[in-house]
Amino acid sequence: MRIVLVGPPGAGKGTQATRLAEKLSIPHISTGDLFRANISQQTELGKLAKSYMDAGNLVPDEVTIAMAKDRMEQPDAENGFLLDGFPRNVSQAEALDELLTAEHMELDAVLDLEAPEDEVVKRIAGRRICRKDSSHVFHVTYSAPKKEGVCDVCGGELYQRDDDSEATVRTRLEVYHTQTEPIIDYYKAQGLVVTINALGPVDEVTGRALEALKRQG
Ligand code: AP5
Ligand code: ZN
Protein backbone atom coordinates (compact mmCIF):
# COMPACT_ATOMS: atom_id res chain seq x y z
CA MET A 1 0.00 0.00 0.00
CA ARG A 2 1.03 3.59 -0.59
CA ILE A 3 -0.33 5.87 2.08
CA VAL A 4 0.08 9.55 2.96
CA LEU A 5 -0.47 10.67 6.55
CA VAL A 6 -1.47 14.28 7.02
CA GLY A 7 -2.51 16.31 10.06
CA PRO A 8 -1.42 19.24 12.21
CA PRO A 9 1.80 19.14 14.22
CA GLY A 10 1.22 16.98 17.30
CA ALA A 11 -1.82 15.15 15.88
CA GLY A 12 0.07 11.87 16.34
CA LYS A 13 1.33 11.23 12.80
CA GLY A 14 4.67 9.80 13.92
CA THR A 15 3.05 7.74 16.70
CA GLN A 16 0.48 6.24 14.34
CA ALA A 17 2.90 5.85 11.43
CA THR A 18 5.21 3.62 13.48
CA ARG A 19 2.31 1.33 14.38
CA LEU A 20 0.62 1.31 10.97
CA ALA A 21 3.88 0.69 9.10
CA GLU A 22 4.57 -2.31 11.29
CA LYS A 23 1.07 -3.75 10.88
CA LEU A 24 1.11 -3.20 7.11
CA SER A 25 4.77 -4.26 6.66
CA ILE A 26 5.73 -1.12 4.78
CA PRO A 27 8.47 1.40 5.61
CA HIS A 28 7.61 4.55 7.56
CA ILE A 29 9.10 7.51 5.71
CA SER A 30 9.13 10.71 7.75
CA THR A 31 10.72 13.78 6.16
CA GLY A 32 10.94 15.35 9.64
CA ASP A 33 12.92 12.33 10.92
CA LEU A 34 15.14 12.37 7.82
CA PHE A 35 15.93 16.05 8.43
CA ARG A 36 16.60 15.41 12.13
CA ALA A 37 18.98 12.56 11.23
CA ASN A 38 20.83 14.96 8.89
CA ILE A 39 20.99 17.54 11.68
CA SER A 40 22.48 15.11 14.16
CA GLN A 41 25.02 13.93 11.57
CA GLN A 42 25.82 17.60 10.82
CA THR A 43 25.45 17.22 7.05
CA GLU A 44 25.10 20.24 4.74
CA LEU A 45 21.43 19.35 4.27
CA GLY A 46 21.02 19.20 8.05
CA LYS A 47 22.58 22.65 8.50
CA LEU A 48 20.26 24.12 5.87
CA ALA A 49 17.15 22.36 7.22
CA LYS A 50 17.81 23.36 10.84
CA SER A 51 17.43 27.08 10.19
CA TYR A 52 13.98 26.56 8.67
CA MET A 53 12.83 23.97 11.20
CA ASP A 54 13.85 26.02 14.24
CA ALA A 55 11.74 28.88 12.91
CA GLY A 56 8.79 26.56 12.27
CA ASN A 57 8.89 27.11 8.51
CA LEU A 58 8.98 24.57 5.70
CA VAL A 59 12.35 23.53 4.33
CA PRO A 60 12.54 24.57 0.62
CA ASP A 61 10.76 22.22 -1.79
CA GLU A 62 13.77 21.50 -3.97
CA VAL A 63 15.84 19.83 -1.24
CA THR A 64 12.81 18.25 0.44
CA ILE A 65 11.51 16.63 -2.73
CA ALA A 66 14.98 15.34 -3.68
CA MET A 67 15.42 13.82 -0.21
CA ALA A 68 11.96 12.20 -0.22
CA LYS A 69 12.46 10.85 -3.76
CA ASP A 70 15.78 9.33 -2.80
CA ARG A 71 14.20 7.59 0.20
CA MET A 72 11.20 6.33 -1.79
CA GLU A 73 13.58 4.80 -4.33
CA GLN A 74 15.26 2.57 -1.74
CA PRO A 75 14.57 -1.16 -2.28
CA ASP A 76 12.47 -1.51 0.90
CA ALA A 77 9.91 0.98 -0.50
CA GLU A 78 9.36 -0.90 -3.75
CA ASN A 79 6.06 -2.44 -2.67
CA GLY A 80 4.67 0.40 -0.64
CA PHE A 81 5.34 3.05 1.97
CA LEU A 82 3.72 5.25 4.55
CA LEU A 83 4.63 8.91 4.08
CA ASP A 84 4.56 11.03 7.26
CA GLY A 85 4.99 14.78 6.82
CA PHE A 86 5.36 14.64 3.04
CA PRO A 87 3.86 16.12 0.92
CA ARG A 88 3.32 19.29 2.91
CA ASN A 89 2.16 21.75 0.25
CA VAL A 90 0.50 21.51 -3.15
CA SER A 91 3.72 21.68 -5.15
CA GLN A 92 5.15 18.74 -3.18
CA ALA A 93 1.88 16.84 -3.80
CA GLU A 94 2.22 17.54 -7.53
CA ALA A 95 5.84 16.41 -7.48
CA LEU A 96 4.82 13.17 -5.72
CA ASP A 97 2.11 12.56 -8.33
CA GLU A 98 4.66 13.02 -11.13
CA LEU A 99 7.04 10.64 -9.46
CA LEU A 100 4.38 7.98 -8.94
CA THR A 101 3.03 8.35 -12.47
CA ALA A 102 6.52 7.90 -13.90
CA GLU A 103 6.78 4.62 -11.97
CA HIS A 104 3.19 3.56 -12.89
CA MET A 105 2.22 3.69 -9.24
CA GLU A 106 -0.71 5.20 -7.37
CA LEU A 107 -1.54 6.25 -3.84
CA ASP A 108 -4.12 4.10 -2.06
CA ALA A 109 -5.20 6.54 0.63
CA VAL A 110 -4.53 9.83 2.36
CA LEU A 111 -5.26 9.58 6.09
CA ASP A 112 -6.15 12.94 7.57
CA LEU A 113 -5.61 12.87 11.35
CA GLU A 114 -7.94 15.39 12.96
CA ALA A 115 -7.31 16.86 16.40
CA PRO A 116 -8.29 20.23 17.90
CA GLU A 117 -5.65 22.90 18.39
CA ASP A 118 -5.69 22.95 22.22
CA GLU A 119 -5.04 19.18 22.25
CA VAL A 120 -2.15 19.27 19.77
CA VAL A 121 -0.52 22.10 21.71
CA LYS A 122 -0.72 19.96 24.90
CA ARG A 123 0.69 16.94 23.08
CA ILE A 124 3.63 18.89 21.70
CA ALA A 125 4.42 20.63 24.99
CA GLY A 126 4.81 17.25 26.74
CA ARG A 127 6.50 15.30 23.96
CA ARG A 128 9.90 13.73 24.64
CA ILE A 129 11.96 11.92 22.00
CA CYS A 130 14.77 9.39 22.22
CA ARG A 131 18.20 10.57 21.05
CA LYS A 132 19.09 7.09 19.80
CA ASP A 133 15.91 6.45 17.80
CA SER A 134 13.38 9.16 16.95
CA SER A 135 10.59 6.61 16.56
CA HIS A 136 10.71 6.17 20.36
CA VAL A 137 8.27 8.93 21.31
CA PHE A 138 6.89 9.62 24.80
CA HIS A 139 4.72 12.17 26.55
CA VAL A 140 5.34 13.38 30.09
CA THR A 141 1.72 12.65 31.11
CA TYR A 142 -0.02 10.69 28.30
CA SER A 143 2.69 8.05 27.84
CA ALA A 144 5.35 8.71 30.44
CA PRO A 145 8.56 6.67 30.42
CA LYS A 146 9.08 4.46 33.48
CA LYS A 147 12.16 6.48 34.43
CA GLU A 148 12.10 10.22 33.81
CA GLY A 149 14.32 11.28 30.89
CA VAL A 150 15.19 7.69 29.87
CA CYS A 151 13.79 5.76 26.90
CA ASP A 152 11.90 2.60 27.93
CA VAL A 153 12.80 0.85 24.68
CA CYS A 154 16.56 1.36 24.40
CA GLY A 155 17.74 3.34 27.43
CA GLY A 156 18.59 6.39 25.29
CA GLU A 157 18.32 9.91 26.64
CA LEU A 158 14.97 11.64 26.09
CA TYR A 159 14.94 15.25 24.90
CA GLN A 160 12.53 17.96 23.81
CA ARG A 161 12.72 19.01 20.17
CA ASP A 162 14.14 22.51 19.50
CA ASP A 163 11.04 23.36 17.43
CA ASP A 164 8.62 22.38 20.21
CA SER A 165 8.82 25.78 21.96
CA GLU A 166 5.46 27.54 22.26
CA ALA A 167 6.31 30.34 19.80
CA THR A 168 7.53 27.91 17.13
CA VAL A 169 4.49 25.70 17.58
CA ARG A 170 2.24 28.69 16.78
CA THR A 171 4.16 29.28 13.53
CA ARG A 172 4.03 25.57 12.65
CA LEU A 173 0.25 25.56 13.15
CA GLU A 174 -0.13 28.62 10.95
CA VAL A 175 2.09 27.06 8.26
CA TYR A 176 -0.07 23.93 8.49
CA HIS A 177 -3.29 25.88 7.91
CA THR A 178 -1.99 28.02 5.06
CA GLN A 179 0.32 25.63 3.22
CA THR A 180 -0.50 22.03 4.15
CA GLU A 181 -4.30 22.01 4.54
CA PRO A 182 -4.80 22.81 0.81
CA ILE A 183 -3.39 19.37 -0.05
CA ILE A 184 -6.47 17.83 1.60
CA ASP A 185 -8.69 19.38 -1.09
CA TYR A 186 -6.12 18.39 -3.71
CA TYR A 187 -6.43 14.75 -2.63
CA LYS A 188 -10.21 14.95 -2.05
CA ALA A 189 -10.50 15.69 -5.75
CA GLN A 190 -8.78 12.31 -6.31
CA GLY A 191 -11.15 10.55 -3.88
CA LEU A 192 -8.29 9.53 -1.60
CA VAL A 193 -8.97 11.30 1.70
CA VAL A 194 -10.13 9.41 4.79
CA THR A 195 -10.63 11.52 7.90
CA ILE A 196 -9.62 9.90 11.19
CA ASN A 197 -10.53 11.21 14.63
CA ALA A 198 -7.12 11.41 16.35
CA LEU A 199 -8.55 11.82 19.88
CA GLY A 200 -8.52 8.98 22.37
CA PRO A 201 -6.06 6.22 23.26
CA VAL A 202 -3.27 5.58 20.73
CA ASP A 203 -4.42 1.99 20.03
CA GLU A 204 -7.97 3.13 19.34
CA VAL A 205 -6.75 5.67 16.80
CA THR A 206 -4.64 2.96 15.13
CA GLY A 207 -7.73 0.72 15.01
CA ARG A 208 -9.77 3.48 13.35
CA ALA A 209 -7.04 4.01 10.76
CA LEU A 210 -6.78 0.29 9.95
CA GLU A 211 -10.58 0.00 9.62
CA ALA A 212 -10.64 3.03 7.32
CA LEU A 213 -7.86 1.58 5.16
CA LYS A 214 -9.80 -1.68 4.82
CA ARG A 215 -12.85 0.24 3.62
CA GLN A 216 -10.75 2.33 1.24
CA GLY A 217 -8.85 -0.65 -0.18
P1 AP5 B 1 7.71 16.94 11.45
O1 AP5 B 1 8.74 16.20 12.17
O2 AP5 B 1 6.96 16.29 10.34
O3 AP5 B 1 6.73 17.57 12.53
P2 AP5 B 1 5.17 17.94 12.52
O4 AP5 B 1 4.41 17.73 11.27
O5 AP5 B 1 5.13 19.30 13.10
O6 AP5 B 1 4.56 16.87 13.41
P3 AP5 B 1 5.07 16.45 14.79
O7 AP5 B 1 6.25 15.54 14.66
O8 AP5 B 1 5.23 17.66 15.66
O9 AP5 B 1 3.82 15.69 15.38
P4 AP5 B 1 3.17 14.29 15.06
O10 AP5 B 1 1.87 14.51 14.40
O11 AP5 B 1 4.13 13.34 14.40
O12 AP5 B 1 2.88 13.84 16.54
P5 AP5 B 1 3.57 12.70 17.49
O13 AP5 B 1 3.19 11.34 17.00
O14 AP5 B 1 5.00 12.99 17.73
O15 AP5 B 1 8.33 18.28 10.82
C1 AP5 B 1 9.18 19.12 11.57
C2 AP5 B 1 9.74 20.22 10.66
O16 AP5 B 1 10.52 19.63 9.60
C3 AP5 B 1 8.71 21.08 9.93
O17 AP5 B 1 8.25 22.16 10.73
C4 AP5 B 1 9.52 21.55 8.72
O18 AP5 B 1 10.39 22.61 9.06
C5 AP5 B 1 10.37 20.34 8.38
N1 AP5 B 1 9.72 19.46 7.40
C6 AP5 B 1 9.32 18.17 7.57
N2 AP5 B 1 8.75 17.69 6.46
C7 AP5 B 1 8.79 18.69 5.53
C8 AP5 B 1 8.33 18.82 4.20
N3 AP5 B 1 7.69 17.81 3.57
N4 AP5 B 1 8.53 20.00 3.55
C9 AP5 B 1 9.17 21.01 4.16
N5 AP5 B 1 9.60 20.98 5.44
C10 AP5 B 1 9.42 19.82 6.12
O19 AP5 B 1 2.72 12.97 18.83
C11 AP5 B 1 2.89 14.17 19.57
C12 AP5 B 1 2.84 13.86 21.09
O20 AP5 B 1 1.53 13.41 21.41
C13 AP5 B 1 3.80 12.75 21.54
O21 AP5 B 1 4.33 13.07 22.79
C14 AP5 B 1 2.90 11.49 21.63
O22 AP5 B 1 3.37 10.60 22.64
C15 AP5 B 1 1.56 12.11 22.00
N6 AP5 B 1 0.42 11.38 21.45
C16 AP5 B 1 0.29 10.87 20.19
N7 AP5 B 1 -0.91 10.29 20.03
C17 AP5 B 1 -1.57 10.45 21.20
C18 AP5 B 1 -2.86 10.07 21.68
N8 AP5 B 1 -3.74 9.39 20.88
N9 AP5 B 1 -3.21 10.41 22.94
C19 AP5 B 1 -2.35 11.09 23.73
N10 AP5 B 1 -1.11 11.47 23.36
C20 AP5 B 1 -0.73 11.16 22.11
ZN1 ZN C 1 15.00 4.80 22.50
Image (cartoon, rainbow, N blue to C red):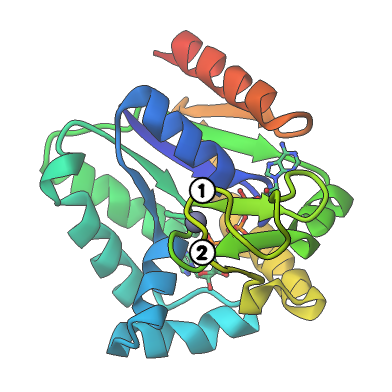
Q: Label 2: how many residues lie within 10 Å, few (<14), some (14-19) or many (20+)?
A: some
- Please name whichever residue, 110 or 14, is drawn nearer the observer in this view of the structure: 14
Q: Circle 1 sits in a helix, a strand or a loop, which is it?
A: loop
| Residue occupying image coordinates x 81% and y 59% | 121
Q: Which mark is residue 101?
A: none
- Relative to 96, is 5 on the left or the right? right
Q: Which residue is identified by label 1? A: 153
Answer above or below: position of 75 versus 108.
below
| Residue occupying image coordinates x 31% and y 75% | 62
List x then y, in percent, for residue 77: 20, 41
Q: Locate the N terminus and report the quarter of the image it occupies.
A: top left
- Answer yes or no: disc 2 within 8 Å of ligand 2: yes
Answer above or below: position of 98 versus 33.
above
| Residue occupying image coordinates x 73% and y 61% | 148
- Answer yes or no: disc 1 within 8 Å of ligand 2: yes
List x then y, in percent, for residue 69: 22, 58
The amino acid type, in three-letter code, at marker 2 is: Gly
Q: Label 1: how many residues lie within 10 Å, few (<14), some (14-19) or many (20+)?
A: few
* Mark 2–mark 1 CB contact (< 8 Å): yes
The amino acid type, in three-letter code, at marker 1 is: Val
List x then y, in percent, for residue 200: 78, 29
